[in-house]
Image (cartoon, coloured by chain):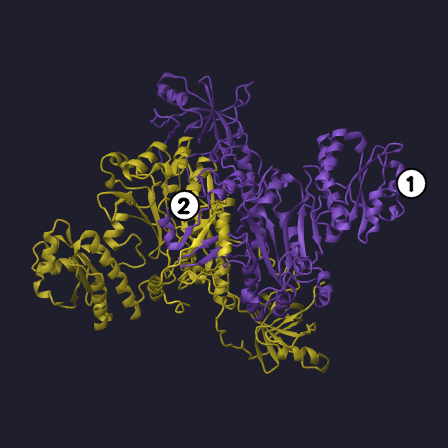
Chain colours: A yellow, B purple
Amino acid sequence: MFSCWLSQLCRGLSTPTRRTTQLIWSSASRSLVLSSQRRIPELSSFVARTNTCGELRSSHLGQEVTLCGWIQFRRQNIFLVLRDFHGLVQVVIPQDEPAASVKKILCEAPMESVVQVSGTVISRPPGQKNPKTEALRLQYRYLDLRSVQMQYNLRLRSQMVMKMREYLCNLHGFVDVETPTLFKRTPGGAKEFVIPSREPGKFYSLPQSPQQFKQLLMVGGLDRYFQVARCYRDEGSRPDRQPEFTQIDIEMSFVDQTGVQSLIEGLLQYSWPSDKGPVVVPFPSMPFAEALASYGTDKPDTRFGMKIVDISDMFRNTEVGFLQDALSKPQGTVKAICIRKGAKYLKRKDIESIRKFAADHFNEEVLPIFLKTNENWNSPVAKFIMEEQGSGLVKLLETQEEDVVLLTAGEHKRACSLMGKLRLECADLLEARGVVLRDPALFSFLWVVDFPLFLPKEENPQELESAHHPFTAPHPSDIHLLYTEPHKVRSQHYDLVLNGNEIGGGSIRIHNSELQHYVLATVLKEDVKLLSHLLQALDYGAPPHGGIALGLDRLMCLVTGAPSIRDVIAFPKSFRGHDLMSNAPDSIPPEELKPYHIQVSWPTDAETEKSSSNHPCRSES
Amino acid sequence: MFSCWLSQLCRGLSTPTRRTTQLIWSSASRSLVLSSQRRIPELSSFVARTNTCGELRSSHLGQEVTLCGWIQFRRQNIFLVLRDFHGLVQVVIPQDEPAASVKKILCEAPMESVVQVSGTVISRPPGQKNPKTEALRLQYRYLDLRSVQMQYNLRLRSQMVMKMREYLCNLHGFVDVETPTLFKRTPGGAKEFVIPSREPGKFYSLPQSPQQFKQLLMVGGLDRYFQVARCYRDEGSRPDRQPEFTQIDIEMSFVDQTGVQSLIEGLLQYSWPSDKGPVVVPFPSMPFAEALASYGTDKPDTRFGMKIVDISDMFRNTEVGFLQDALSKPQGTVKAICIRKGAKYLKRKDIESIRKFAADHFNEEVLPIFLKTNENWNSPVAKFIMEEQGSGLVKLLETQEEDVVLLTAGEHKRACSLMGKLRLECADLLEARGVVLRDPALFSFLWVVDFPLFLPKEENPQELESAHHPFTAPHPSDIHLLYTEPHKVRSQHYDLVLNGNEIGGGSIRIHNSELQHYVLATVLKEDVKLLSHLLQALDYGAPPHGGIALGLDRLMCLVTGAPSIRDVIAFPKSFRGHDLMSNAPDSIPPEELKPYHIQVSWPTDAETEKSSSNHPCRSES
């Protein structure tokens, strides 16, 4: 049988209460209804309670109910507010003599004690409102999890993933396959955690994604695979990254780029919370080159305009020195953005801030100037701007009164990149002045496509490296270039961008063993032996296949509007990768390392000092 | 646009085929229909095919279809058999002159090439049967995965887990919460893999289960948690274990033992494949003491009887020497099992095998004897068995003609344990002789309950250790004994057993901080500082809670009837923990270990020799 209980913070109370008390209903639950009809879950099956605190309504008036929850508040020993994950209920503490012991317990129990109460539902006395309580100081994660916001975030995450599974498994026949996380280290995989095995000198690694496995599953005829996959990346200290993260990992056989994109559009539409507004499909698509030229980034925030415009031709005969300099070089360009009503909203210190931001990213070919267009060009260099240039700008940028135009010059990619950053910086400034540029209720999805397949290596631009990974297939129109001008080959890679954040990426893969061998050995000059198992697999009849991975933590962060991915993860690590609750990572006695044939290489004193000055041990939270 | 393709094993073919060919339908798909009605998934959405090979039926006759798959077989350049994950289709190769190039490609493509074919569905010419093909040698996992059995196992696993999720999330309001796998090492956790961090001497560990996190989620008010959780256990070489495995991990607040059991019964009933027969609930329940006494194990196979019977009283005055010896000791007992028709089915060499098995587990207090009961007791010691003992045995064991009775003597637990092993050994022998004792189509679930909370430590029986884990709550009736005779306290732990295999276990947890502290510090004499975060959490108002974990790999192994858990895992490790496809674990250059402040301690030559003779490197498969 189930007995009653009363757990407490302090000592002194040990008698459980089993006494009828009276309840007054109220609810603080937030709606978690998703986009399609579903059976209401039986939240009180198998347990002692008859109802949750959040579900009591006027239809329950007069009913005997049993509730379980935490004491959130007590007022004058007359009322309790009882809280569970679903909402709040006001409980009338019995005042009659026979219930004296119950009253004593309820009135002495510390806040946050757990109680079970039974009683009759009555209506709220007129004029009484929900008492407000001081927020608990969220010193510990398990207390933080009790907050309405964390409950909402974690429950919404669970429900959205469940909808995704329904869409993939039940509607489209995908197979949920678990792939190993103890794997072989990728050559040069500097971001992979290593795990010593019991064989001397042999290590597993924690993979950054199930990429190889999902391709092997296609070779294995699984046809349609997905997994909510735990992935690992050791990047040291990064502010908004986690050493372990989750991706919705998908791979399909006999599919092309359009097929994968349609699948993802359907997936997000199906799983999107109904209170976040409908998802309109298909998502717009933009070639990488256009994203760079118009937004200065491969992940444009398309919730607002302020696009970058190339005005090089207009300034061929300029007298402005740095523009002249830039345009005299073979790759030289001039770029502009127009800040609507900038003259009205931006203050002197904002302009200073933009200048400072530009200076931080400054190089000899890039410098912003400011042109106020109320009636005259108001700028230090205005006198050098000829009339036809001025009117050209007005025409091309469609400037109006009180707009501000920013100009920069330099090599195309660098100039675009700086303008892209200034564009976001200006948006921040305008919003700080009350202008709504990026509607927080708006979700603006965008496919970015036609990426280059290879990029020049930073350290040696004569050599090429994969823009994404070496299994990405070339664009069908560009295959002939692979053997002559590989740097010109576009790929069948696609990124999914939401409100300026990359939330997913994928590609059609190379399924031909010879082509894969050519890319690895001839173009990338890698040691093909290290991927011999994959090459061999492709040689045994591989279907054409492609896929995608969505970053679940980032996606949930954007859906919930949370400020950090830590707010959508139950037990996140600190920015230094620490679990501050349990104190992981922690020391291990040397004898427990023996079975793994490793020992710690302690740094010298000098190294320790340097390291601790970089990472002050006590300063993180 | 989507183009056609033909991928090949050998070189020489590079032209894709895009030509109509004729199809003849057939299907080899196995039914995967689960227990409740579901929408049929759209297996051909987003891709080039119009149908899967397995779904063509007479209703498709005359239709133009496009299929994608592997060439499984070719007969006299006239027919192809095309295979995908769903089934087989016979394809008529066009013989007319205009299609000569198509014919050439199709006839020259190696087996297992991937093709796309379009054509009209016609009916099978009378008399033609599905061609049988030689099974591919399953040298590599990605080829093995193409087999009907592996496809079935992985797809059934996916679907069963999906049904479990529907039951938990949609029907009962559970929240799917992901918990970290980079955690703090449990003190003395010799089975936990360690992961060096970038801080010198500091290590994460891969947890064996999310036990602490799920309890903290209950403290955090999540109310109902589940996760299909990846867990890790480093046990070195074990034949049917995996270093990473999956459990259905569940925790609930405000629940008692009956509640968790009802939940699991409902879960299995809901998710059970319909072609495996209905699951009857509630499952029977058996106290641990009874399981030991009647079956000699805590995981009884209840598909057959052959129970252990205590016949100590009957033999108080025996003249049989070893029974006399055993019963003269304070803990001495005599046990028997009856093998129905044993005299008919067991041959001399079977009896020898049972004797040998017993000898392998022999100690001075345990020895089996054999009594054939056709008319006389036929046994070397029969002359010492008195008539009243003989008739007592017949009565108590309900022996009939041709039965065999095995006797053993010794301390209760040891004697039961040996008899439990002999019981299973005899069942194997009888089944080898054609007697069906354990119906392979029968699924016999059993709860084993009322375990002891503590057990004497093997190395020092004066001290106690947890029978399961230190968070297990004591049985409510036995709480008073905790402070006086803790070894007598039963726990609120429960195991779920299926056909003699433990497939799950769980408990009601201690939710009172003082009680948890008492168990850790006073009873178990452990260092409470190492679990201070959990004790502190319990101190902040913890609801009563409990849960369970089901071993998914073992469960799927039993459901599919697979001989090994490797048959229900896409990419299993070998028994030595190796990934034989990619060759993990593998060596890492010393410079890549530097960021982790570790170095390899290479064993001496003598150690290496010893180790390699224990583990011959090339002998595993």
**For the residue labelled by badge 2, is the local secondary structure a helix, a strand or a loop?**
loop
Task: Give the number of callouts.
Answer: 2
The answer to whether A394 appears left or right of B327 in the picture is left
**Residue receiving disc 1:** B386
Q: Nearer the viewer, residue A321 or A269?
A: A321
Please state the horizontal and vertical placement of residue B539, each as a whole percent of the image: 58, 71
**Would residue A179 be found to the left or right of residue B499 on screen?**
left
Viewport quadrant of the C terminus of chain A: bottom left
What residue is shown at x 72% (from left), y 62% (from top)? Answer: A1
Decide if residue A201 is in sight here: yes
User: Residue lying farthest front?
Assistant: B606
The amino acid beneath tag 1 is: Met
Q: Nearer the viewer, residue A358 or A80?
A: A358
Q: CA distance from mark 1 to mark 2?
A: 71 Å
The residue carrying mark 2 is: A185
Q: Looking at the image, which is closer to me, B213 or B617? A: B617
Where residue B477 appears, x then y in whole percent?
A: 74, 64
Residue at 9% across / 62% down in the picture? Answer: A385
